[in-house]
Image (cartoon, rainbow, N blue to C red):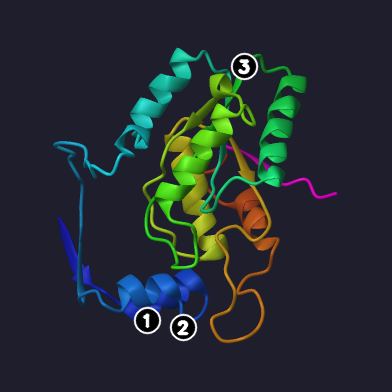
Amino acid sequence: IEIYKHPKEERIARTWGTTAPGLPYVEETITKAGNWLIGGDLEVIEPIKYHDGLDRFRLSPIELRQEFEKRNADAVFAFQLRNPVHNGHALLMTDTRRRLLEMGYKNPILLLHPLGGYTKADDVPLSWRMKQHEKVLEDGVLDPETTVVSIFPSPMHYAGPTEVQWHAKARINAGANFYIVGRDPAGMGHPIEKRDLYDADHGKKVLSMAPGLERLNILPFRVY
């Protein structure tokens, strides 16, 4: 176990690239936190249950790997959402599977991995997003035989290029070897100025050079 000081200003500056007021996760969590942090190895005694009707979607990395093995997946491509699936998303995911088949894979499986932790007040709540995702599968917009829907329990930090590295590395643990990344991943508008907080292309550029991602193939959005 390690106990150490919580340098809030430094943490905020290094993670978000700014200390401007109005960053949602900062105001919700970090500024309210104490001045000390504790770290160390964790031992999971029993999985957390929320009893909100969605626990069946909360699969651990081990459970996800087992599910991919059960489906005889030879490639797993992950896509994260914090809002409902729209037609563009659906086209992107089906097109990605087509591309993987053309590359020679026999049974690529989609991991649709919606974010399930903290999100901004103006994001669609998780319960409604999950209902919509189920309907997308029920209506055949995405093939339920080649799609696994699971909640990614992380909070949304809206930390752009820094955060997207965490998103990508977490999917390696879940068994993915392809990760779809779009415009301005994990981004948001500047809390003060009328512009995006991050450059729209920085996320995918960072992923192409970040250490620890050698086992993950990055698939940028195709823009026509």
Does the magenta portion include 178? no
In the rendered structure, which amino acid carries the disc numbered 1? Glu
- Amino acid type at circle 3 is Asn
Per the image, label 1 sits on a secondary structure element best described as helix
Numbered circle sitting on residue 107: 3
Measure how far apart labels 3 and 2 are at the Cα level: 46 Å
Q: Residues within 10 Å of mark 1 (few under 14, many from 20)?
A: few
The answer to whether 170 appears left or right of 87 in the picture is left
Say what secondary structure mark 3 lies in. loop
Identify residue for label 2: 19
Which residue is drawn at the image coordinates 66% and 44% (left, top)? 89
Mark 2: secondary structure: loop
Measured as percent of width and height from the top left, residue 74 is found at 58, 18
Q: Position of residue 180 (x, y in %)?
A: 63, 42
Tell me if mark 2 has few (under 14), some (14-19) or many (20+) residues whose alpha carbon lies within 10 angstroms of its own.
some
Per the rendered image, the range of residues in magenta is 216-224
**Picture coordinates of residue 201 (x, y %)?**
70, 61
The answer to if 223 sits in the magenta stretch is yes
- Toward the right, the furthest residue is 224
Q: Residues within 10 Å of mark 3 (few under 14, many from 20)?
A: some
Quarter-of-image position of residue 145 = top right
Disc 3 from disc 1: Cα separation: 47 Å
Q: Nearer the viewer, residue 224 or 198?
A: 224
- Observer-side mark, 3 or 2, equals 3
126 versus 62 height, above or below: below
- Compared across the picture, whether 6 is left or right of 89 comes to left
Marks 3,1: beta carbons within 8 A: no
